[in-house]
Amino acid sequence: MGTVVISADAELGWGFHDLRDRPEERLANARDGWRWFAELCEQYQIPTTWAVVGHLLCDDCDGRHTDHPTPDGWFDHERGPDAMPRSLRFADGLVDDIVESTVDHDIGLHTFSHVLFDDPTTTREVARAEVGRALDAARARGLDPTSFVFPRNRIDHREVLASYGIESYRGTGPGIRGPGRTLRKLAVATVARSDPRIVTPYVDDAGLVNVPASLFLFSFEGAARATVAPVFGDPVLRHAKRGIDAAAAADGVFHMWLHPNNIVTDRDARRIECVFEYLDRRRNESAVRVRTMDEVAAETRAEHKATGISPD
Ligand SMILES: [Zn+2]
Ligand SMILES: [Zn+2]
């Protein structure tokens, strides 16, 4: 019996604050995209792992965070004439809606301020502050997150996560190191019709459960999408359907992910709605299940304990 996992990196403006060129359209739609995606989960009763940037969970801040060991200037976007608006720095109710949803979502973390964990300036102290503060902000709201997604999937300081009681993270796995590589791999897969990536979660050497990613739902964009879609249909949707079918036919996990702020146009929304529609249908007519990262982590640990061996 296979499993489908969906994870969403919930970050509003935090995913872009260190970039010179910010995608204004995605930022302008970030809150609407989040709400729309949460409603879609509700409509289809699909539980999702929401990896939330910890700062979003705060009620307020001084815009400086001088006691945080990040490099100088890291929080500059929070103040001054070009400051990112409050609506992109605080969830202000968006996370509460997910918590209160009729769907049993998994609220995980995506650091405190979207620090890149493999950056040379990210010392162990910075990593500890990013995990510790995110957990504090979550616990102040009565949450107890155990799932984690690394900003831009840049994995490092896993032992810090383990020391704070995080149980699982989304891995990248062999051959996929981020959206750039994913795009190329998917472009090839679309042409060659190679098999979707069914993954096997495992307990890693830091004692965390790695739930590797299978498909970034916005990995085939821009000119490539515009060229291929009119002829072959939406290549990502096709790939997602084949992944769901593969999970229905075998053991293992098909793990799709996105940022809610990827959903900007009607075409983007249609893609995600079609994926959910198909997943819901297959869930009803086959043995495929939908599980969150925390559930998959618990099952993987139980198996690991029973067999004492990692499938990796
Ligand atoms: Zn702040
Ligand atoms: Zn992110």
Image (tube, helix red, strand yellow):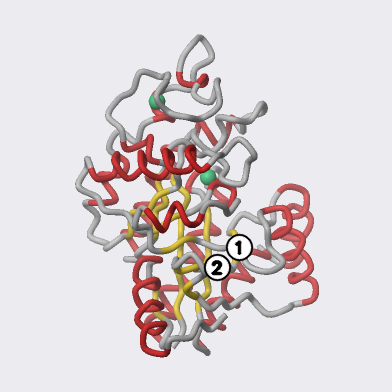
**Considering only order in the chain, which callout, 2 or 1, is on the residue closer to the N terminus?**
1
Left/right placement of residue 81 relative to residue 21 reads: left
With respect to residue 309, does 199 lie above or below?
A: above
Q: Where is residue 222 in the image (x, y as percent from the top left)?
A: 72, 47
Amino acid type of disc 2?
Pro
Q: Which amino acid does label 1 sit on?
A: Thr
Residue 305 appears left or right of 205: left
Query: x, y (%) of residue 157?
Result: 52, 51
Pointer 1: what residue? 172
Name the secondary structure under disc 2: loop
**Quadrant of the frame with the N terminus:** bottom left
Classify 10 Å Cα crowding around label 1: few (below 14), some (14-19), many (20 and above).
some
The reply to whether callout 1 and callout 2 are in contact (CB within 8 Å) is yes
Residue bearing the label numbered 2: 212
Residue 48 placement (x, y as % from top left): 38, 61
Q: In this view, does 309 lie above or below 236?
A: below
Q: Is residue 245 visible?
A: yes
The residue lying at 68 percent from left, 80 percent from top is: 195
- Of residues 148 and 26, which is closer to you in this image? 148
Ligand 1 quadrant assignment: top left
Foreground residue among 59 and 85: 59
Q: Residue at x 33, y 59 (%)?
A: 106
